[in-house]
Image: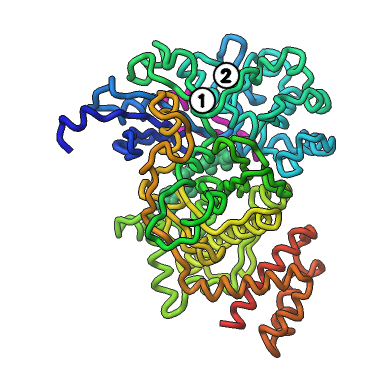
Amino acid sequence: MSGGEQEQRNYYLGVDVGTGSVRAALVDQCGVLLAFADQPIMKWEPQFNHHEQSSEDIWAACCIVTKKVVRGIDLNRIRGLGFDATCSLVVLDKQFRPLPVNHEGDPHRNIIMWLDHRAVSQVQRINETKHRVLQYVGGVMSVEMQAPKLLWLKENLRETCWDKAGHFFDLPDFLSWKATGVTARSLCSLVCKWTYSAEKGWDDSFWKMIGLEDFVADNYSKIGNQVLPPGASLGNGLTQEAAKDLGLPAGIAVAASLIDAHAGGLGVIGADVKGHGLACEGQPVTSRLAIICGTSSCHMGISKDPIFVPGVWGPYFSAMVPGFWLNEGGQSVTGRLIDHMVQGHAAFPELQAKATASCQSVYAYLNSHLDLIKKAQSVGFLTVDLHVWPDFHGNRSPLADLTLKGMVTGLKLSQDLDDLAILYLATVQAIAFGTRFIIEAMEAAGHSITTLFLCGGLSKNPLFVQMHADITGMPVVLSQEVESVLVGAAILGACASGDFTSVQLQTFKTASPCQDVKQLTNGVAMAQVLHQIDVAWFNESWLSRIKEDVGDNWRIKVCRIMRELDPNSGPKFSTKLSKNLFKKLIYRYILLCIV
Ligand SMILES: Nc1ncnc2c1ncn2[C@@H]1O[C@H](COP(=O)(O)OP(=O)(O)O)[C@@H](O)[C@H]1O
Ligand SMILES: O=C(CO)[C@H](O)[C@H](O)COP(=O)(O)O
């Protein structure tokens, strides 16, 4: 493109605050990403299940990446700025200064992160109320939402934090306030994490019932009494002070923000799939499921009418795509779990050395190592004797049980690189089975999903993507623009600028052409078998179906599984867990028998 043509371009900025880093992108009016930068952010884990961050550190990182992506361009052509972030809780005092959320009194650490599980007793009491707002979070409130964390602060840090607090923000709202000085909250954050209803507003009786009547008394001024749809323009745009911090001209339009998963959903769910022969091409957008997979995975499905899915968050009205209800399934640790399993293995130093020597990431190295050891087999079958249950940080969906833990069965004494590679594969498969489990719950409640759209850091891992296609039996679409979460954030800025009338899917007409579709490989056989077993399971005649499918050996195989799960000879499992692990193990053994 010539310099002259470039002058005509309008630019939009997207800033995405993930769990581990802040990213920024400069995007043009066609949704093409022109520049990208990222910057790690600090995290503290002062005790088990307490996870904290610093809003000042995060803002500083936002400034670094924004300055980088606008380097060398005509700043006057930047029309709008949008933020998305994790749904962490930011606490500020009445003068907007950071307040400590920890016993140490360190005010620098003023964010309780989304994955923090300190408020277990508080969330149990909230769930015991069976208040009507709980219907809109899948029937059970998650410890990762804001109400239990607020109650924890009141009960544990009354003098040092609660009494001094002037403002509690969801992180995406903190960022838009920091940029504009406007304390209005995004409908997305309040509906999804704070029990606000798009139709009815706050429910006073809920806050009174859980012991946080303070918010009602001051008309919700500390948690938000002005609510705007994502993409709405805030105040007079970027303030002088924020403009100086970010290296931008003052007055640029700034949008009401989105939670990161929702920005990713907006970035991919409308992808143009023409020419790939996908069923969803001729189907409504409600047949698509966006999965945003980074530290965690979030499964975003939309519908015209509200659908209540037990254990799956929502239904939330207009929280992602205006006019549609959203259900959000999730797995609290996915990327983090894979990193944990790989980095904690005895062969990790060897892996690192070999990956470095071959100029590859550890994951690229592991993927090619699996290709080597699988020989003529399909890679999926390397794990017939090794199984991972992935709920190392509880189960977000669809069991909605924070007490669940992870486990591995089938370990041997050897700990070489092959073992590490197979453990890594079993972990990826376990996560994909978790996705399948969530899709089953959504479909049982009324969703009709045919195609998956993946984005986030894990979507850059071909094995992760392929296992999702194989295990769910659905094609997986990857957008041409891999940084789809940032495209979603930039869509917000484009909407706030007034250049586009809404954040509806057509905002950037060419924003997300489909780049690649992972169809099933040998997983066709696998998926079909799994489907049969599933049908059998839900018909409660699973044993006879297994017998039919597997033939004479079925009793030996099933007995082997039963022995593994015998509560007298192994660890004790909760009923739910053993049922699901059992089902999963049966899948694997049946596969072994049939193939
Ligand atoms: N190219 C890649 N191959 C495999 N895994 C990747 C790749 N890039 C990122 N990841 C994984 O994705 C996760 C981080 O995803 P990201 O979207 O950056 O997370 P977050 O938004 O939570 O900060 C990490 O677990 C990381 O190991
Ligand atoms: O709860 C969520 C969205 O509703 C996300 O899991 C949370 O915000 C963390 O996201 P990420 O894994 O991308 O860092």
Quadrant assignment for the N terminus: top left
| Dot label at residue 256 | 1
Mark 2 nearby-residue class (10 Å; few <14, some 14–19, many ≥20): many
Left or right relative to 22: residue 296: right
Mark 1 and mark 2 in contact? Answer it, CB < 8 Å: yes
Q: Residue at x 73, y 18 (%)?
A: 215
Quarter of the view holding residue 210? top right
| Dot label at residue 470 | none
Q: Is residue 60 magenta?
A: yes
- Whether 87 is drawn above or below 384: the answer is above
Q: Is residue 346 magenta?
A: no
In the image, the residue with mark 1 has its CB under 8 Å from the nearest atom of ligand 2 = no
Image x and y of residue 241, in percent: 41, 12
Quadrant assignment for the C terminus: bottom right
For mark 1, give the secondary structure: loop
| Along the line of sight, the residue nearer the viewer: 309 or 371 | 309
Separation of residues labelled 1 and 2 (CA atoms): 8 Å
Image x and y of residue 170, in percent: 59, 27
Label 2, on which residue? 184
Mark 1 nearby-residue class (10 Å; few <14, some 14–19, many ≥20): many
Q: Which residues are magenta?
A: 41-62
- Whether 276 is drawn above or below 543: the answer is above
Q: Residue at x 49, y 32 (%)?
A: 84
Q: Residue at x 66, y 29 (%)?
A: 198
Where ligand 2 lies, by quadrant? top right
For the residue marked with disc 2, what is the amino acid? Ala
